Amino acid sequence: MTRTLITNGLVITASDELSVDVLVEDGKVVALGTGQNWTADTTIDASGKYVVPGGVDAHTHMEMPFGGTQAADTFETGTRAAAWGGTTTIVDFAIQSMGGSLREGLDAWHAKADGNCAIDYAFHMIVADVNDASLKEMEALVGEGVTSFKLFMAYPGVFYSDDGKILRALQKGAETGGLTMMHAENGIAIDVLIEQALARGNTDPRYHGEVRHALLEAEATHRAIKLAQVAGAPIYIVHLSAAQALAQVQAARDEGFNAFAETCPQYLFLSTDDLARPGFEGAKYVCSTPLRPAEHQAALWRGLRSDDLSVVSTDHCPFCFKGQKEMGIGDFSKIPNGLPGVETRMDLLHQGVVEGHISRKRWIEIASATPAKMFGLYPRKGTIAPGADADIVIYDPTATQVHSASTHHMAVDYSCYEGRETTGRVETVLSRGKVLISGGEYHGKPGDGQYLKRDTCQYLR
Ligand code: URP
Ligand code: ZN
Ligand code: ZN
């Protein structure tokens, strides 16, 4: 039996702030308390620090094939970078290929991740080909712990599903308890606007933001919610960026409907000004849904406070500027869509605390507790309580850092936040009681992370 004691810190969970010690035994939290005279093999002094549950990033794409290339982080590099940033669980997306089965897709993602991850991981399933066979397979997958399924209203000819297919998948969700995650953008209309923009000679990265109009996100969000209501199914909107789309989610929630949504740090801290950077630099900021004008950020922070946005995930899908983003020189539609972020989410959200947008408890709720509940991992993940996995971050709330590609651990040649200073920094990271990060060193190894079978969404039962 190994025992670790974390003393003198402020333990912050979604519900409490407590000045208590935390006792860890064999990878699990066993007790919280004061004045207990506990003995341990290792004692970590967290004086002046926060003691918080490890982050749960419910939206990553490690080594995802996309846009004619592949996301630059492997499961090994991406989960190591996540650990450096205080995230101890990811939920990545396995992909069904067109004409293939869900099982083949899931097996392929297990093969990529198995033995390579630094932190614990689980899978959602991207359903690219909704048909009788894949609908049937969804039932089996829910039973096996893959309990959420992403569909796309965007990317015709790649991942796109029409409304009939979406309705059928939602009906299956209503039947099985599987949660449908929706990429809500009207991809058919967007493709027309792309063609027209390119014909006018508007080829720069900033046009990516213009053709992926906020109203086409709002329209798709509205349609997705209505289809879910018709099916009697819950729905979770991924990577929401537009204030008008948020208004749709808010209206549905006000009516008492089970509509949930996430946003991502890039939508809270970056804007179309970044997409419009001179030369081709804007390509570094091409993702979908796209960055929006800075005015949207206030609405998103408000949505996080009011719980109309329940989760902040990263949508980590990094492509190097050299050789990958450059594929779109002269044609913005060929820039691979996606940004790096798995390492910076906890810090950027803490910056939201520093700037007064959210409270400390809300920081932990949107970054750890709610994603764990939303995707059936709570209370094993997302909290510090007896019985929980000892995924614990000692966080220095006063240390400052300057973000840079020269110091980050993601396998990508740029940082979206190059030169930006934030306050707060991860000091020590434990994953199931094992120290992964301390003293500025990584102590883990590929294979430390274990696969997690998930329950269904815990807001629905
Ligand atoms: O631009 C993005 N979001 N790339 C990743 C794929 C997706 O749609 O989530
Ligand atoms: Zn998406
Ligand atoms: Zn994504």
Image: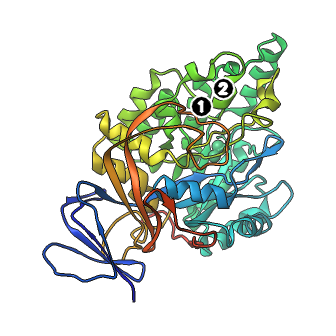
What residue is shown at x 73% (from left), y 64% (from top)? 109
- The image quadrant of residue 34 is bottom left
Residue 313 locus on image (x, y percent): 51, 48
* Residue at disc 2, secondary structure: loop
Horizontally, is 431 left or right of 68 in the view?
A: left
Asked if marks 1 and 2 touch (Cβ < 8 Å), the reply is yes
Sequence-first disc among 1 and 2: 2
Query: Of the numbered discs in the image, which one, if any, rests on residue 212?
Result: 2
Horizontally, is 373 left or right of 238 in the view?
A: left
Horizontally, is 160 left or right of 86 in the view?
A: right
- The image quadrant of residue 317 is top right
- The image quadrant of residue 138 is bottom right
Residue 454 locus on image (x, y percent): 54, 70
Query: Of the numbered discs in the image, which one, if any, rests on residue 217?
Result: 1
Residue 295 locus on image (x, y percent): 45, 20
What residue is shown at x 66% (from left), y 24% (from top)? 282
Q: Nearer the viewer, residue 332 or 104?
A: 332
Q: Amino acid at mark 1?
A: Glu
Residue occupying the far bottom of the picture:
1
**Residue 417 drawn above or below residue 258:** above
